[in-house]
Image (cartoon, rainbow, N blue to C red):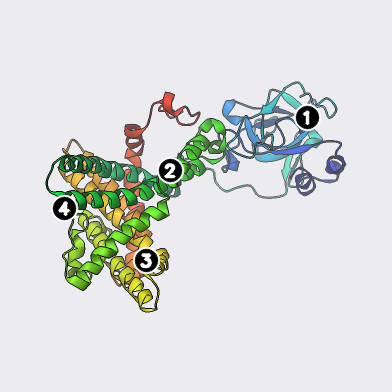
Amino acid sequence: LFVKSVLMLGSKRHIPYAQQAQQYQIYGCFSLTELSHGSNVRCMRTTATYDPNTQEFVINTPDFEATKWWVGNLGKTATHTILFAQLYTADGKCHGLHTFVVPIRDPVSLCPYSGVIVGDIGKKIGQNGIDSGFITFNDYRIPRVNLLNRTGDVTAQGKYSAARCQFGPRSSGEVAIIEYQLQQWRLFPYLAAVYALDAFMISFYEDYAYMEKISSTDSQYDLQAMLAQEMHILSAASKPLSTWLARDAIQECREACGGHGFHEASRFGEIRNDHDPSCTYEGDNNILLQQTSNYLLTLVFLKSTRGVAIKSPLGSVNFLDRAESILNRKFKPTTIDDCKDMKVILRTYEWLVTYLAKKSAEKVQSSLGGNKDMFSARNGSQVYHCRPLAMAFIETRVLQKFYEYINNAPDHGNVKAVLVKLFLLYGWWSLDKHLTLLLQGSYLKGGECVNLIHETILSLCSELKGEAVRLVDVIAPSNFILNSTIGNDNGQ
């Protein structure tokens, strides 16, 4: 980047820098990102003010947040940098972001020059072979000719001229990242998932206590066996759902924090690595899902071949006994309000699980008819049938229990209204992953239904914006436990 920047942004007077770098007489780097600004380049705050008396630019880092950060090869090695700074002329006028060639270390001793504070940013969660560095400036002077002047220059007298137009009108101020729709869409569904899974886990613990109570008796052995089986398949499916959600949430949060999320001090790396084995220990997630789908398919086969009613002690599968009527359902929303009904989501999930159970059973039966054994038939039906069946089933159970939790919750202030929004967001966000099946099975018809569902998701994200911080505060660990430089409960 150093050599190319010199050649593309500079003029003939800068060619010697490129030649010296190519001959390894100097070592260059590229200083754009600041501690508080990365993608928003226009708002970089390092300044370069022209002094016509000495024909020099005086470079300053106005505060800690303007520290140049994440600069590759700067930590220990670079002698020069391409510096992005706001150019000011002596009259106090800002002419926008410009680039400068700035010497920062002695090429022989590698000691930094006076007025420069430079060093390594510390350990990252990866790529520690790159000495990513930081740099600040305090009244550090460079010659006027070090301005890369392909598109703009300052005369010796301090006159500024530009060969191109600058950006359009500036806004009155920067927008908080949480205001961006994309940021809300990336993060808020995971926040909603936390509350949905919490409600499910409360009910799961209660069901487990019930199973323990029944198991302690010397009777009702059939009930004990059926209850243990149902608890097992709920447990087997809820582990993949919860651990994959956590895995994806950690990564999305890491990326949403930009470069800062990649620094070890953010603790995203440690959190991600500590969580990662959860997807494989105590049962590989994909294998566990097969146990759940096998159980569901067995119930479907028993009903179709022997007329055995589909029911279970906890009632998680009972709706499958009404398969024929459920599969006749259709959803034809005309407005967003049609989608903001919790029962619509529950009915949609019942249809989805019933549809997948039917298609999975047909797929396995078809394979058996092709002279495959049961193992091979089920093994060949996992990707587009049995695996989605198990995932849709546990998502249904989670939402059923969240629905019950909301209905039984005391209505203090707007608490219940917020919980309903969390239910709707998690529900539609999860169903969004199954839209192909909903369209394939004609439960939904036409692109307008899809558009309304997507508009509903975005609408709910916007509505939850004002509650998001408080919702996080409710579940967040203390600063001492979190121990992150970017995750303090005071927002700093």
Residue 222 circle label: 4
- How far apart are the two marked residues, 2 and 3, measured between alpha carbons? 24 Å
The residue labelled by disc 1 is 142
In the picture, measured across the screen, residue 393 lies left or right of residue 87, that is left
Question: Relative to 119, is 81 above or below?
Answer: below
* Mark 4 neighbour class, 10 Å CA radius: few under 14, some 14 to 19, many 20 or more: few
The residue labelled by disc 2 is 278
Q: Quadrant of residue 298?
A: bottom left
Camera-near label (1 vs 2) is 2
Mark 2 or 3 closer to N-term?
Answer: 2
Q: Are marks 3 and 1 in contact (CB under 8 Å)?
A: no
- How far apart are the two marked residues, 1 and 4, measured between alpha carbons? 85 Å
- How far apart are the two marked residues, 3 and 1, measured between alpha carbons? 66 Å
Mark 1 or 2 closer to N-term?
Answer: 1
Mark 2 or 4 closer to N-term?
Answer: 4
Q: Quadrant location of the N terminus?
A: top right
Give how far across and how far down residue 333 sits, in percent: 26, 65
- How far apart are the two marked residues, 1 and 2, measured between alpha carbons? 54 Å
Q: Quadrant of residue 465?
A: top left
Please, what is the three-letter code of the amino acid marked with disc 4? Asp
In-front residue for pair 166/132: 132
Please, what is the three-letter code of the amino acid marked with disc 3? His
Residue under the point 73% across and 38% down? 29
